[in-house]
Amino acid sequence: MIERRVLVVDDEESVRDVFAAIMAQAGYQVRTAESGEEALEMMRQEPSWVLFLDLRLPGMDGVELCRAVRREWPLAIAHAVTGFSSLFELSDCRASGFADYFTKPVSPADLRAAAARAFEKIDRWRGRSTS
Amino acid sequence: MKTLIADDNPVTRSILEQAVRAWGHEPTSGATGTAALYALEDPDGPRQPRYLILVTGRGGSADVVEGLEAGADNYVSKPFHPMELRPRVRAGERALQLQRELVERERFQRALEMAGAVCHEFNQPLQVIRGWTELLLDEAGCGDGTALRSIGVAVEAGA
């Protein structure tokens, strides 16, 4: 079983705090970053396999960050979390490799279910590759 | 479509007016460019998109080039049959339609972006409220002062 590390990226501290609490309560090891650049730095030190990314970030935005993550860590599963949804955004998200897309305010239960599903997939993929 | 005809020859003006009217447009004409422009629109008003067809009499290609360089979109050389003008007027209609659509799309895009920014402002604090509230309801040990204080701050930001 892969380490249950989750990375939350949002430029607003209050949102990072609540997402971190939601993930910690479900037993995940959570880290948070306030920008795409900081997130990539953290990933390089120690990768998190499941990510929740805000789409509007200062500097590199969520879509660019997702592309960069998927390039360096193809196994990682990223979810988009956005304060505003539009159809254009959704197609951009799918194209950049997001597994799923949530509109704020998202329920903690949905976030936890997404994380659980993502880890289940990664374990299955890894199980197949090592056996 | 509003059509402006500027020609110093009254016979040419009349022929062009008739042709343009027969194609379903509203012609306005003048003997000079300035007179025609004043007849068509308020010179101090917003500039409308235009499609300009040069009607050249002297036949020299230097004139045509100069006219096109100065901003004309198309041209016909005299003498010409009004039917030669018709496809050019249609091209103008298409170009103007595309310009209008573009302006409309840009306006829509701006409105969408503004709505997005407003939604974002509301949804950030709502996310904090929803997250902490549901965690508290789960009674899973997050009910310390931090959670309640965060809810208060978020409500204030959303108000």
Image (tube, rainbow, N blue to C red):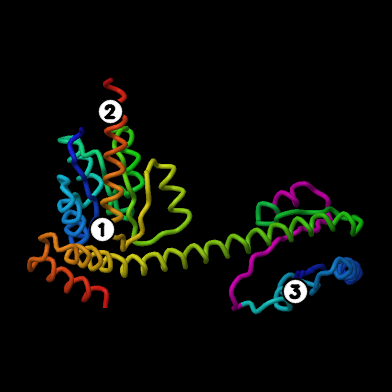
* Residue at disc 2, secondary structure: helix
Mark 1 is on which residue type?
Answer: Pro
Asked if labels 1 and 2 touch by Cβ distance under 8 angstroms, the answer is no
Chain of the residue that carries numbered disc 3 in the rendered image: B
| Start-end of magenta stretch | B44-67
Q: Looking at the image, is mark 3 or mark 2 nearer the viewer? A: 2
Q: Chain of mark 1?
A: A
Left or right, residue B144 beside residue B19? left
Q: Is residue B66 above or below residue A46?
A: below
Q: CA distance from mark 3 to mark 2?
A: 77 Å
Which chain is mark 2 on?
A
Is A20 or B11 nearer to us in this picture?
Answer: A20
Q: Is residue A10 left or right of residue A91?
A: left
Q: Earlier in the sequence, mark 2 or mark 1?
A: 1
Residue plotted at (75% across, 71% down): B2
- Give the residue at x 40% y 64%: B116
For residue B36, which numbered disc appears in the image? Answer: 3
Q: Position of residue A104 (x, y in %)?
A: 32, 61
Percent x, y of residue A21? 16, 56
Q: Determine which of the numbered discs, if any, sits on residue A108 in the image.
A: 1
**Mark 2 closeness class: few <14, some 14–19, many ≥20 residues within 10 Å:** few
Give the percent coordinates (x, y) of residue B150: 15, 68
At x 84%, y 58%, the residue is B86
Residue displayed at 90% across by 71% down? B14
| Badge 3 amino acid | Ala
Q: Give the foreground label among 3 and 1.
A: 1
User: Can you tell which quarter of the image residue B16 is in?
Assistant: bottom right
| Residue marked by disc 2 | A126
Q: Is residue B78 left or right of residue B2?
A: right
Dot 1: within a 10 Å radius of its alpha carbon, few (fewer than 14), some, or many (20 or more) residues? many
